[in-house]
Amino acid sequence: MIVKSVLNNSALIAFNDKKEECVLIGKGIAFNKHAGDKVDDAKVEKIFSSHQSRTDELIELLEDVPEKVFEITNAIIRYANRKLKTELNSGIYVTLLDHVNSAIERFSEGIVLDFGMLDEVQMMYPKEYEIACWALDYINATLDMDIPIDESGFIAIHIIANSSKGMDTGIAKKVLRITRDITKIIEEYYNVNLDTTGITYSRFITHAKYLALRYINHSQIEEQEDNIFTLNPNVVEKTKEVIGILNDRLNETYGQSLSEYEKMYLTIHICRLLKIS
């Protein structure tokens, strides 16, 4: 590939073998490079072709965002890929770069946002939360800032949203809100403070997370003829009202009821969580 133009030390626009323009990202990939030079393929970490929907948006960001902020964001993405042992969706280069730049600008202007769901992120996505906390420390240390811990929640959302197909920041936030609402309603109805350190709670949260994701994506599990669940009538009676409250809340907020199968599965997890028999 041949360099067309340099965006910064770690990003450039190049022509591929088909003479098509593409954006290349890699640590130091553009250092001392000029138009017409050959690209060092070994330094290429990510390629954005002209056919990808967000390439133009990425170029605009790279032209506007300070190079230091881009380098920080790139380091965070490399760290996340290494820790998660996967490669985040390419959209992370656009969404996280834009967010990190905005977060730095907000803090410089004395504006601090309240995330409000850090506990849920930490419980449901511990790896992503740990990465986000590292990222926030890295930003603060590199730029000599003191952006509050709430920012790690927003960073985590971007990592979560780009770690799998069919996910975006909006869906990730809805999953957190629904899971939070489910646990809050259960605590209020039974007048208990759930032990968030136990394996039972962890399993419950995992179920609630995937229930919320299925619910949002309109892909709930419907009751099947070969249903393996047999619930004690007394158990059903003890959880019937709280399940109804949860269903009503979801219906009022998102305009969709839980399927009977999902209600049954949720009943089982509530019983395990609260040792109802």
Image (cartoon, rainbow, N blue to C red):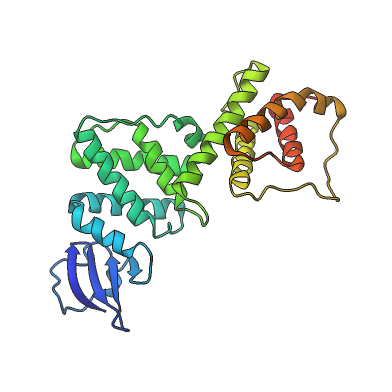
Image height of 164 relative to 171, above or below: below
Q: Position of residue 38 (x, y in %)?
A: 21, 79
Please name whichever residue, 203 or 11, is drawn nearer the observer in this view of the structure.
11
Please name whichever residue, 272 or 240, is drawn nearer the observer in this view of the structure.
240
Position of residue 277 in the picture relative to residue 111 (left or right): right
Position of residue 264 in the picture relative to residue 101 (left or right): right
Image height of 144 relative to 78, above or below: above
Q: Residue at x 50, y 45 (%)?
A: 171
Position of residue 263 in the picture relative to residue 51 (left or right): right
Position of residue 50 in the picture relative to residue 205 (left or right): left
Q: Position of residue 251 (x, y in %)?
A: 64, 35
Q: Position of residue 266 (x, y in %)?
A: 71, 35
- Kindly tell me whether residue 271 is visible in this rendering: yes
- Kindly tell me whether residue 78 is visible in this rendering: no
Q: Residue at x 87, y 28 (%)?
A: 233
Give the quadrant of the N terminus: bottom left
| Identity of the residue furthest to the top in this view | 191
- How many numbered markers are drawn? 0
Image height of 191 relative to 101, above or below: above
Give the quadrant of the C terminus: top right
Image height of 37 relative to 43, above or below: below
Q: Quadrant of residue 15?
A: bottom left
Q: Residue at x 29, y 60 (%)?
A: 58
Q: Position of residue 262 (x, y in %)?
A: 72, 41
| Identity of the residue furthest to the bottom in this view | 18
Q: Quadrant of residue 239?
A: top right
